[in-house]
Amino acid sequence: MSDTTKLKESLENLARDLVEKARSNTVWRQRNAVNLIPSEQTMSPLVRLLSITDPSGRYAEHKKVKALGDTEVYYYQGTWFITEVELELVKRMEEFLGCSEVETRLISGQMANVTVFSGVLDYLNRVSRKMEPRRFRSVMNHHIGKGGHLSAQPMGGLRDYVSIDPVTERRAVVNFPVLADNPYQIDLPETAKLIEQHKPELIIFGKSMMLHREPVKKISQMIAGIKPKPIIMYDGAHVLGLFGPYFQEPLTEGADIITASTHKTFFGTQRGIVASNMSKGTDYFDLWKSIVRRAFPGSVSNHHLGTLLGLLMATYEMNTYGRDYQRQVIANAKAFAIALKEQGLQVEGDPEVNYTETHQVILRVGYSKGIETADRLEKNNIIVNYQGLPDDEAFTSSSGLRIGTQEMTRFGMKEEDFKELAGYMAEVILSEKDVSQQVSDFRKRFTKMQYCLPEEQARPLVDGLIDSLIDLKRR
């Protein structure tokens, strides 16, 4: 047997093994397991298939060129289709958010945050280009141990953009103080004192462990008299798909900028966006231009055109079904939290609002028992995050579980279904029972995707895409 034949047979065996493992994992995650991770979402079949069509291997770099009268210049040929898609996505995303500007080329929420940090600093340094650019003198954010996301921390995405405080010899970041009786909410009177003391140039809302609305309007009013006014950024990675009348509308309430990933509560592919009302003629139009420049060429070259196309379909779905979905996600989270409490589990948050105002529910399972409990739930086909709670000294000693209702809501679960699921979870957590088969049988009742094009209408479109991907010769 020749070396070439051996290599081909080896490749076939490797491919067969990989495909079988991928198929098995997909069946488990999509048919047998209940996914409650609050940062994940299953895409509809059309969104998923559109993401692997021809644009997934292409480039479409472009930017406005001042010398050509701010004409949008593309650096590749053959981009007419993706140009159309990108313009349409911007339009539909502006429609969803009720805003005037959206940058859609970023490929993650963390990249969106870093792009904004870079863009705001570029704007602050605009007065003199002859001096070494300065960093933020002070930033206010959520502490990572109280739900703040890594991308807005000095150890993460913020690191290279914030100054060293000469007094503390640490990064000049001050954290929102929290209420003594509810560490998941901001203490507004104490925040006012810290703003007066530290005069932050950038205020960052939004968390990865998020049970409540952010007090955007109140803090916007609090800083109204400060000159120059601090920039308010809302990291909506976890709650983009909830923005609207049932949750909150940050730009209307006083935020200057929204950043987000598009695949948690939103229906989309894994990407990132930045949005604002900083249109031409507004005071901050130059800031918006700085952010766009830091998107391209500052942060991306190839901006993953396949997932861009998929995101457009997801945005069509959200603009059609979003309000019904949002209402159901939040109703499910509240019902789930109450049911878990009634099962004897310790639910975090404010009981006055049924423990949550978002898609998330937080459980306390005992000091340093988060990892062990999450592992036991996974063995029973229930997938959650272990989570450090505000009084845990480190993530490795997590006392909690972070749970989200968004993905299973898309598969048709309602309040009564989450109550049933709460019973299975209690059996695993409190009694260490094996309910893996019951959970698998339960999940099989919820496999049909909701809040998207109905199956009878989507099926011929899906078949057409599959046909084009598998057998191009027939065309």
Image (cartoon, rainbow, N blue to C red):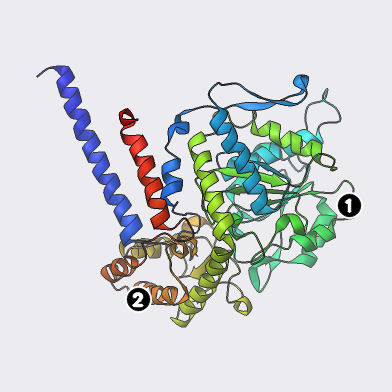
Q: Which residue is mark 2?
A: 427
Q: Is residue 204 left or right of residue 353?
A: right
Q: Which three-letter amino acid code belongs to the residue tagged 1?
A: Ile
Q: Earlier in the sequence, mark 1 or mark 2?
A: 1
- Name the spot of residue 134 as percent of width and height, x first: 78, 33
Q: How many marks?
A: 2
- Name the spot of residue 231 as percent of width and height, x first: 78, 47
Q: Are marks 1 and 2 in contact (CB under 8 Å)?
A: no
Q: Is residue 228 left or right of residue 187?
A: right
Residue at disc 2, secondary structure: helix
Q: Which label number is shown at residue 205?
A: none
- Figure quadrant of the C terminus: top left
- Figure quadrant of the N terminus: top left
Q: Is residue 2 left or right of residue 314?
A: left
Q: Which label number is shown at residue 226?
A: 1
Residue located farthest toward the left when viewing the structure as drawn: 1
On screen, 364 above or below 263?
below
Q: Nearer the viewer, residue 333 or 85?
A: 85
Q: For the residue carrying disc 2, how many other residues have a C-alpha within 10 Å: few (<14), some (14-19), or many (20+)?
A: some
Q: Nearer the viewer, residue 412 or 442?
A: 412
- Name the spot of residue 372 as percent of width and height, x first: 38, 62
Task: Determine the image quadrant of residue 160.
Answer: top right
Task: Determine the image quadrant of residue 49.
Answer: top left
**Residue 311 visible, this orientation:** yes
On screen, 173 above or below 470?
below
Residue at horizontal 38 percent and vertical 48 percent from the top: 460
Q: Which three-letter amino acid code belongs to the residue tagged 2?
A: Glu
- Name the spot of residue 467 as percent of width and height, x first: 33, 38
On screen, 2 above or below 464?
above
Q: For the residue carrying disc 1, how many other residues have a C-alpha within 10 Å: few (<14), some (14-19), or many (20+)?
A: few
* Spatial separation of the CA atoms under disc 1 and disc 2: 54 Å
